[in-house]
Amino acid sequence: MIEEKESATNVIDMSADDKPRNNWRQLLIGHPLQTADAHNQTIGKAIGLAVFASDALSSTAYATQEIMIILAIATASALQYVFPIAIAITVLMAIVAISYEQTIHAYPGGGGAYIVARDNLGEIPAQAAGAALLTDYILTVAVSISSGVAQIVSAFPSLFEYRVIIGIALVFFVMTINLRGVKESGVLFAIPTYFFLVAMVLTIGVGLVKYFTGALGPVVNPPEMEIVGVVSVVTPFLLLHAFSSGTAALTGIEAISNGITAFKEPRSKNAGITLIWMASILGTLFLSISFLSGKIGAVPSEVETVISQLARTIFGGQGVMYLVLIAGTTIILIMAANTAFADFPRLGALQANDGYLPRQLTFKGSRLVYSRGIVTLAIMASLLILVFQANVSKIIPLYAIGVFLSFTLSQAGMAKRWWKSGRLKGDEELVETGSTIRFDKAWKYKMIINGFGAVCTFIVMIIFAVTKFKDGAWIVVVIIPLLITTFLSIHHHYKKLAAKLSLEKYTNTIRVNKHRILVLVAGVHRGSLAALAYARSLGDDVTAIHVSTDPVESEKLREKWAIYGEGIRLVILNSPYRLLLEPVMDYIQKLLTLRAPNEILTVVVPQFVPSHWWENLLHSQTAMMLRYGLLFKSNLVIIEVPYQV
């Protein structure tokens, strides 16, 4: 049912009550939601922790191991530096968390590093932040899923050769859940997230009790250390290399600042509290795992993860509690991809709305999520898993440069924001795209916090780029500038298009004094006669065009045309080389060259439509190819006349 309401300006408002039809997509992702239901799709702190913190929390499953892998290049005794390095990383984690907590309250509309850099640092830094974050989210999915598969393989070694297939299947599983909507995916993922937290806290608690009571022994039958003793001494460069690998523990901290709009009101308060919860839990788990791993003598190995060695040592074998922790760790690693699926589409939509990515990414699907961004992320992450064969250590070097670049730009932008706040007086306001700046009495204190955070994360980014450059970090160093160039090219296209379509200083000088109509005829049949009848309704100057590749068939067409052509002139283009498109294109180009002023050429293309989609595969899509070929010519109108058969 459609209700009409006509206004005084001859604009008719129509209300449509039509509902989407039931189909297989509804069975998969749920019934469509109305736009007005958007406010009901927000989440609280408990669910928010599951949605946005799973990436950060999951890094505890591999961050310690990544430190060990680098230290194992030296002597086995170098593993004693794992815990001191973990302390340094935790201090950095606290600095970044405090900085982002300020960002959340300053930018309640979300957007994180991209919005902060856009409003305070300019176009290029904003696109650098966008490129870094989008790259990070793709890598987050690939790393977390691959690490989850590694946990499965540790418990069931026979699945090792199927790790890539398992990884890609899990990516599309998480994609499907996210297509169901933020609220529903959050509820579904909350249970496994808290299951992991309980299992990990219990494991660490038992491990610490055993250690302090002297009951914690070394790991039994540890896997063979794959790389050891390549260098003879522990150098500062090696320690920095290990530090940079361990900073993978910080990935995901920015996620909450990017997704503030997903929280219930008061958004900033709820998001800020969730961030503090997440950072506290993350730091505690990371330090505890690093401490206990050193005490049991765990070794880095692709065959068995450090978490697996820790669990079977604490619980005395691969019993129920071991399987519980491995299951919980596997699940949280898979759920970690959910953070990227929550933030990648939002950031993509923000950049698309600003004109730096295709506008299609701003479209919300039937469940009020940016479904095209979600699908794009799944495809790109799956390709990474396939290329790197689900090997976490091979993907990690690509990981943290983008993370720390976004950290640095975000904190530098916030420092600039507080500086601008300090320049305001009294009730003055500075309205920017992402927020409104007012004078803040504590602007100097806040500027120092964010400035110090920017310096720290910048130093770590440089360390990571240098120490991991040969291991694959060079790929990200190349990709981010390429992405920035792509973003700017897309933006240039949209600006150029907007300028050409703008009505500013526009005078309507479009006049059509003459209308010439061409009808493309492959044969004389019901479809072509329907197109011919439509063409005659447009005007009297009608010409039919036929490309002759077979003289015998062309002669038959002449005979039929004499009967059914109704006196309309027919131009036969002889094509001795049996080309179809080129003769038509050349003929139309000649007509366009000779056209009179204010003359429009209309090309009518008959198109028969089979009753089943698969029947199109049985026919050459000549009409479609002609349409695309003619689309880029000016002063030309293309009309397709369908004929159902």
Image (cartoon, rainbow, N blue to C red):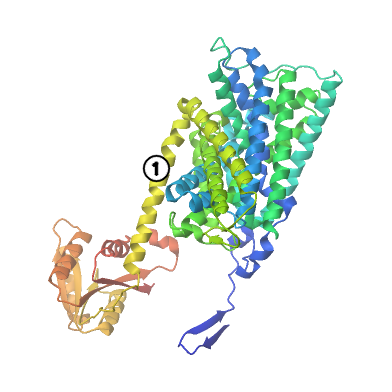
Classify residue 164 as left or right of residue 582.
Answer: right
Q: Is residue 177 visible?
A: no
Residue 29 quadrant: bottom right
**Toward the viewer: 21 or 621?**
21
**Toward the viewer: 577 or 56?**
56
Name the residue rendered at 18%, 57% in the picture.
578
Name the residue rendered at 43%, 39% in the picture.
479
Q: Which three-letter amino acid code belongs to the residue tagged 1?
A: Leu
**Toward the viewer: 420 or 131?**
420
Q: Is residue 433 above or below residue 50?
A: below
Residue 513, x across and y down, in percent: 20, 82
Residue 643 quadrant: bottom left
Residue 117, x across and y down, in percent: 50, 49
Few, some or many residues within 10 Å of mark 1 (<14, 14–19, 20+): few
Quadrant where the N terminus is found in the figure: bottom right
Q: Is residue 363 above or below residue 525?
A: above
- The outermost residue toward the top is 232
Q: Is residue 99 visible?
A: yes
Q: Find disc 1 in the rendering and name its residue.
A: 482
Q: Is residue 555 above or below residue 204?
A: below
**Toward the viewer: 365 or 396?**
396
Quadrant where the C terminus is found in the figure: bottom left
Residue 623 quadrant: bottom left
Which SS class for mark 1?
helix
Residue 239, x across and y down, in percent: 58, 21
Q: Is residue 582 above or below residue 382?
A: below
